[in-house]
Image (cartoon, rainbow, N blue to C red):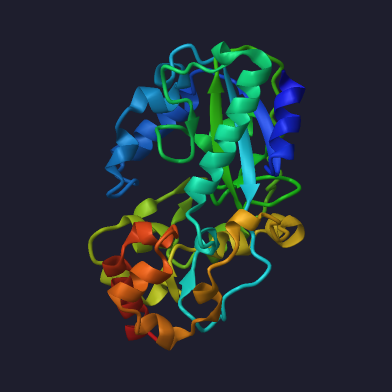
């Protein structure tokens, strides 16, 4: 079953697949509670909800015994013009990656059920997830042998870098499991040193200082202390990942036609972005992950960037 699932995952277009034993994440629970108590999650109140389900998948999906983890590369072969307001690479595609990844996960589920019977997946509960439920995807990917969590708090795959999406399927079957690999960041601190807002401290992320958080999750005005530090980032941030040696060596352009680029992102200059109307936003980004942030948030970010140029 182990090899069947991994082979089918690759045939469906996933770039890697690993399988971990479902268990309680005790150390993560302790760390996360401390992190929440310090308020490092900012306005992301959802991170404090369903805490037990987040740290023990067996409480999220009763009967869960194994967690299949897949990753999908999204590193682009073409980048925006450096003078244009920068959009996180995760949002370059025309179609929201959630839909792409979810569709592939559903295909994999069907193959598993056809081969091992419908009881291999508990159909009473939702059992496949794409960062839309209380699941610690990066930790399960680490446990499934797909990489390690780097000092920038992202998962690093030794042959792909860290530019990829993560999806999970929870099964009620025991099987052979993949072994975790040791962290390989060593003494490197390039991601920590490169962060303009000093959001990375002691292997943890202070979300309230993170540019990705400030330009996406934060629904209030960006605090004035960060205005000059946004580094031309209009939505999301890749600074810590861009400087990572593992990405410089191993990140290669994806080959997924479902993630074809939105031409506006690559073609537009600063004037195009600043003249964007709400009607234009709804047209150009109708199916994009950018739509989730909202027009008002994007425009507010652009105003901050332009005021500090």
Tell me: 186 left or right of 309. right
Q: How many numbered marks, from 0 up? A: 0
Residue occupying image coordinates x 52% and y 36%: 137
Q: Position of residue 75 (x, y in %)?
A: 64, 59
Q: Quadrant of residue 32?
A: top left
Residue 82: x and y in percent read 56, 80
Camera sees residue 222 = no
Is residue 25 in sight in this rendering? yes
Q: Which residue is located at x 40 percent, y 32 percent?
A: 134
Left or right, 60 with respect to 91, comes to left
Residue at 56 percent across and 15 percent down: it is: 118
Of all residues, the one furthest to the left in this rendering is 220
* Residue under the point 34% across and 27% down: 51
x and y percentages locating residue 143 in the rendered image: 62, 29
User: Closer to the camera, 280 or 192?
Assistant: 280
Q: Nearer the viewer, residue 274 or 225?
A: 274
Task: Please tell me whether residue 129 is drawn above or below residue 201 in the rendered image.
Answer: above
Residue closest to the eye, 187 or 5: 5
Identify whether 246 is placed above or below 285.
above
């Amino acid at each position: 079953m182990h090899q069947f699932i991994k082979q089918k995952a690759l045939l469906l277009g996933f770039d890697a697949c690993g399988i971990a034993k479902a268990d309680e994440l005790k150390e993560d629970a302790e760390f996360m509670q401390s992190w929440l108590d310090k308020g490092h999650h900012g306005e992301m109140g959802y991170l404090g909800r369903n805490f037990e389900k987040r740290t023990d998948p067996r409480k999220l999906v009763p009967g869960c015994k194994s967690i299949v983890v897949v990753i999908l590369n999204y590193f682009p072969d073409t980048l925006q013009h450096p003078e244009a307001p920068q959009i996180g690479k995760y949002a370059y595609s025309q179609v929201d990656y959630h839909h792409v990844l979810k569709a592939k996960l559903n295909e994999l589920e069907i193959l598993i059920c056809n081969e091992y019977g419908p009881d291999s997946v508990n159909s009473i509960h939702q059992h496949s997830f794409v960062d839309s439920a209380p699941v610690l995807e990066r930790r399960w990917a680490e446990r499934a042998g797909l990489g390690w969590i780097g000092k920038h708090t992202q998962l690093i795959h030794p042959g792909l870098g860290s530019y990829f999406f993560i999806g999970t399927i929870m099964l009620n079957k025991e099987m052979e499991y993949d072994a975790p690999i040791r962290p390989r960041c060593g003494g490197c601190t390039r991601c920590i040193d490169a962060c303009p807002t000093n959001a990375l401290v002691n292997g943890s992320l202070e979300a309230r200082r993170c540019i990705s958080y400030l330009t996406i999750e934060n629904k209030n005005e960006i605090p004035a202390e960060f205005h000059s530090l946004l580094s031309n980032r209009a939505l999301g941030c890749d600074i810590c990942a861009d400087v990572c040696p593992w990405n410089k060596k191993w990140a290669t352009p994806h080959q997924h036609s479902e993630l074809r680029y939105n031409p506006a992102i690559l073609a537009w200059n600063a004037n195009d972005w600043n003249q964007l109307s709400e009607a234009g936003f709804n047209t150009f980004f109708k199916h994009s992950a950018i739509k989730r942030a909202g027009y008002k948030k994007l425009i507010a970010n652009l105003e901050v960037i332009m005021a500090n140029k």
